Amino acid sequence: TFHPAFLYESIWCLLIWFVVTRAERRWSFVRGQSFTLYVALYTFERFFMELLRVDDASKIFGLRFNAVLSAALCVISPGAVG
Protein backbone atom coordinates (compact mmCIF):
# COMPACT_ATOMS: atom_id res chain seq x y z
CA THR A 1 0.00 0.00 0.00
CA PHE A 2 1.06 3.55 -0.62
CA HIS A 3 0.45 6.85 1.11
CA PRO A 4 -1.16 9.64 -0.96
CA ALA A 5 2.05 11.65 -0.76
CA PHE A 6 0.95 14.15 -3.43
CA LEU A 7 -2.14 14.93 -1.39
CA TYR A 8 -0.08 15.36 1.78
CA GLU A 9 2.35 17.65 -0.01
CA SER A 10 -0.42 19.72 -1.60
CA ILE A 11 -2.08 20.28 1.75
CA TRP A 12 1.26 21.13 3.35
CA CYS A 13 2.10 23.63 0.58
CA LEU A 14 -1.24 25.38 1.13
CA LEU A 15 -0.49 25.52 4.85
CA ILE A 16 2.97 26.96 4.14
CA TRP A 17 1.41 29.62 1.90
CA PHE A 18 -1.01 30.54 4.68
CA VAL A 19 1.73 30.71 7.34
CA VAL A 20 4.13 32.76 5.18
CA THR A 21 1.48 35.28 4.12
CA ARG A 22 0.22 35.67 7.69
CA ALA A 23 3.77 36.08 9.00
CA GLU A 24 4.52 38.73 6.35
CA ARG A 25 1.48 40.73 7.44
CA ARG A 26 2.19 40.37 11.15
CA TRP A 27 5.94 41.12 11.17
CA SER A 28 8.07 43.38 9.00
CA PHE A 29 10.24 40.94 7.08
CA VAL A 30 13.47 42.09 5.52
CA ARG A 31 14.27 41.00 1.99
CA GLY A 32 14.62 37.24 1.80
CA GLN A 33 12.98 36.28 5.07
CA SER A 34 9.75 35.11 3.44
CA PHE A 35 11.71 32.85 1.11
CA THR A 36 13.81 31.58 4.00
CA LEU A 37 10.69 30.74 6.00
CA TYR A 38 9.28 28.94 2.97
CA VAL A 39 12.48 26.91 2.51
CA ALA A 40 12.58 25.97 6.20
CA LEU A 41 8.94 24.85 6.26
CA TYR A 42 9.06 23.04 2.90
CA THR A 43 12.22 21.11 3.69
CA PHE A 44 10.80 20.18 7.10
CA GLU A 45 7.84 18.58 5.32
CA ARG A 46 10.03 17.10 2.60
CA PHE A 47 12.07 15.22 5.22
CA PHE A 48 8.99 13.32 6.34
CA MET A 49 7.74 12.76 2.77
CA GLU A 50 11.06 11.13 1.92
CA LEU A 51 10.59 8.71 4.81
CA LEU A 52 7.28 7.57 3.29
CA ARG A 53 8.77 6.68 -0.09
CA VAL A 54 9.30 3.01 -0.89
CA ASP A 55 11.50 3.23 -4.01
CA ASP A 56 15.23 2.53 -3.94
CA ALA A 57 17.56 5.41 -3.17
CA SER A 58 21.07 5.97 -1.92
CA LYS A 59 21.33 6.17 1.85
CA ILE A 60 23.50 8.11 4.27
CA PHE A 61 23.45 7.33 8.00
CA GLY A 62 20.64 4.83 7.33
CA LEU A 63 18.37 7.54 5.87
CA ARG A 64 17.62 8.41 2.26
CA PHE A 65 20.00 11.02 0.86
CA ASN A 66 17.05 13.30 0.02
CA ALA A 67 15.84 13.15 3.63
CA VAL A 68 19.28 14.03 4.96
CA LEU A 69 19.58 16.92 2.49
CA SER A 70 16.12 18.21 3.45
CA ALA A 71 17.00 18.08 7.14
CA ALA A 72 20.25 19.96 6.51
CA LEU A 73 18.49 22.67 4.48
CA CYS A 74 15.82 23.02 7.15
CA VAL A 75 18.46 23.60 9.81
CA ILE A 76 20.65 25.88 7.67
CA SER A 77 17.92 28.05 6.10
CA PRO A 78 17.06 30.21 9.18
CA GLY A 79 20.67 31.34 9.37
CA ALA A 80 20.74 32.37 5.72
CA VAL A 81 19.21 35.79 6.42
CA GLY A 82 21.16 37.73 8.98
Image: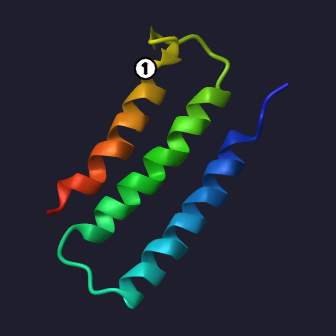
Foreground residue, 30 or 6? 30
Q: Position of residue 42 (x, y in %)?
A: 46, 52
Foreground residue, 45 or 76? 76
The quarter in which the C terminus is drawn is bottom left
The quarter in which the N terminus is drawn is top right
Q: Secondary structure at mark 1?
A: helix
Q: Position of residue 54 (x, y in %)?
A: 67, 19
Q: Residue at x 33, y 41 (%)?
A: 73
Residue under label 1: 65
Q: Residue at x 64, y 25 (%)?
A: 53
Foreground residue, 2 or 59? 59
Model colouring: rainbow
Quarter assignment of residue 51: top right
Q: Position of residue 13 (x, y in %)?
A: 55, 60
The residue lying furthest to the left in this view is: 82
Mark 1 surroundings within 10 Å by alpha-carbon count, few (fewer than 14), some (14 through 19), many (20 or more): some
How many labels sit on residues?
A: 1
Q: Residue at x 32, y 70 (%)?
A: 34
Q: Residue at x 45, y 12 (%)?
A: 61
Q: What amino acid type should be assigned to the residue bearing mark 1? A: Phe
Q: Is residue 54 left or right of residue 2?
A: left
Above or below, comparing residue 74 to residue 14 in the picture: above
Above or below, comparing residue 19 to residue 6 in the picture: below
